Amino acid sequence: MGWLEERRFDWVPVTMAALSHLMGGTPFIIITDNERQWFAKYLVTMLNCAERNRPHLPIFNAFDITPGLEQASRADNIDLIDNMLSLAFNDRYILWYIGRSDNVLAKLPKKLSDSFLWVIDEDIQNSFAMRSRDQLLDIKLMHMARLLDKTIDAAMFGKVTI
């Protein structure tokens, strides 16, 4: 995980901002591009594993709770999804986007100021940027998930303050 140590100044502010919302009970809704849908399922399962000895976190896979998300290819569909999430979560949620920035599903999290963004192939302010040409991208995502899990534990059990 030495690569992440080199990028700690990119990682820490983005992650700490997101964790302050998560520790405050704000639900997180994970949206991904098509290539990373497996990772959204993995994150929800891993972060809420019963063996973690901590309360379950309000982290949801958008594809599980939003009908028709995969077919959302037009701006008006994205607006309908935004409206549905706003109603369902009473305008109190964070979108966690993982994927390529040119994906149509990235439009919604990119327009919200509090989104937690792990963006591929674009440098966006207040996001963690990665590159699609990186052959170790999936492994790096797994490293990030592991570090995030350890950070959540540390925040919950008072080892770090957010």
Image (cartoon, grey):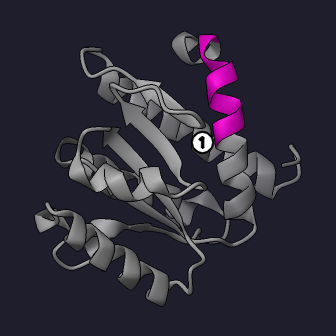
Q: Quadrant of the N terminus?
A: top right
Q: Considering the numbered disc 1 on the image, is that residue within a helix, a strand or a loop?
A: helix
Q: Quadrant of residue 4?
A: top right
Residue 94 visible from this viewpoint:
yes
Q: Relative to 27, does residue 109 appear above or below in the rendering?
A: above
Query: Which residue is pictured at 70% across the width and 32% down the height?
Result: 12
Placement of 26 over or under 15, stated as above or below: below
Give 5 or 111, whichever is nearer the viewer: 111
User: Which residue lies at the image location 33% right of the left edge and 68% below the top edge?
Assistant: 62
Residue 77: give x, y in percent of width and height: 21, 72
Residue 45 shows in this picture: no
Residue 38 inside the magenta-drawn segment: no
- x and y percent of residue 122 in the render? 38, 27
- Magenta region: which residues? 6-14
User: In the figure, 16 relative to 8: above or below?
Assistant: below
Left or right: 29 as drawn, with respect to 54? left
Identified at 64% across, 39% down, the residue is: 14
Please tell me which residue is depicted at 47% across the width and 81% down the height of the picture.
86
Residue 34: x, y in percent? 17, 48
Please give the residue where the numbered disc 1 appears in the rendered image. Answer: 148
Q: Amino acid at mark 1?
A: Leu
Is residue 17 placed above or below 67 in the rendered structure? above
Dominant secondary structure, magenta: helix
Residue 81 horizontal/vertical position (percent): 31, 75
Q: Is residue 119 left or right of residue 15?
A: left
Q: Residues within 10 Å of mark 1 (few under 14, many from 20)?
A: some
